[in-house]
Image: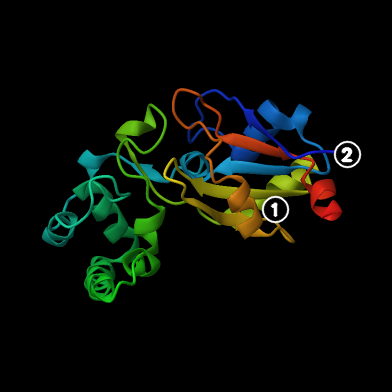
Amino acid sequence: MAELELVCVPTRILTDNDDIVDAIVEFGGHNIGPEDIVCVAESVVAITQGRFTRPEELDVCWQARMINRFIHPDGSMASIYGMQSAMNLDGKWKVLGAFFLGAIAKAFRKPGVFYAIARAASLTDDVTGTMPPFDKHIVFGPKDPDKVAEKIVQRTGCYGAVVADVNDLKRSAILGTSRGIDANKIAQLLIDNPFGNDSQMTPIVIIKNYASVSAAK
């Protein structure tokens, strides 16, 4: 009987000169079958879409500086530049409002309200959040992740595809899926973060035999 297997696909450094679907075909196409799920790291999808900036290109406002004082240093908004990027995308007053609502919600032991409202903040990778040379950049969330997943399926013939946001703190979220894929199930399979977005250069993971194993359960 077939078993689930997570296969990491090594690549070169991918940039905004690359197309993520072309890269998946080039580096992993030979190992992708009709029962497999192709998973790709959201930061690399965003990079190939040109969705990044350098901190020195940002004009940091006082609102970003103020909010940043209350952000945990290990959080996704660890620097004033990440916070400013989120404000540029979502609007500074929306992010500021989300901050105050989040603070009130925390007082009632309801975490996560800030990031639920300020979606750009939850999707932005701050400085050092991804592989070199983009560790000196701020990387925004990917555009149209569902469409990216559908394109992967069309090009590779795989069972399904997802764009995933996973880290080493057991946080696993699926930002985009192809049709018919259960995002929660895939998120659990990726909970131990098989991706390597640093020197490993393995931003693509193939879940082998997913269709047949799921059908057997």
Helix, strand or loop at disc 2?
Answer: loop
In the image, which is nearer the foreground, mark 1 or mark 2? 2
- Relative to the observer, which residue lies in front, 196 or 168? 168
Total numbered circles: 2
The structure residue drawn at horizontal position 56% and vertical position 54%, both measured from the top left corner, is 174
Helix, strand or loop at disc 1?
Answer: helix
User: Could you say which disc has been placed on residue 178 in the image?
Assistant: none
Label 1 crowd bin: few (<14), some (14–19), many (20+), radius 10 Å: some
Which quadrant holds the N terminus? Answer: top right
User: Could you say which disc has been placed on residue 1 in the image?
Assistant: 2
One can see residue 148 in this view: no
The structure residue drawn at horizontal position 44% and vertical position 28%, both measured from the top left corner, is 198
Question: Which residue was labeled with disc 1?
Answer: 150
Q: Earlier in the sequence, mark 1 or mark 2?
A: 2
Residue 134 lies left or right of residue 175; in this view the side is: left
Where does residue 75 sit, x and y in percent of width and height? 30, 49
- Relative to the observer, which residue lies in front, 14 or 102? 102
Which quadrant holds the C terminus? Answer: bottom right
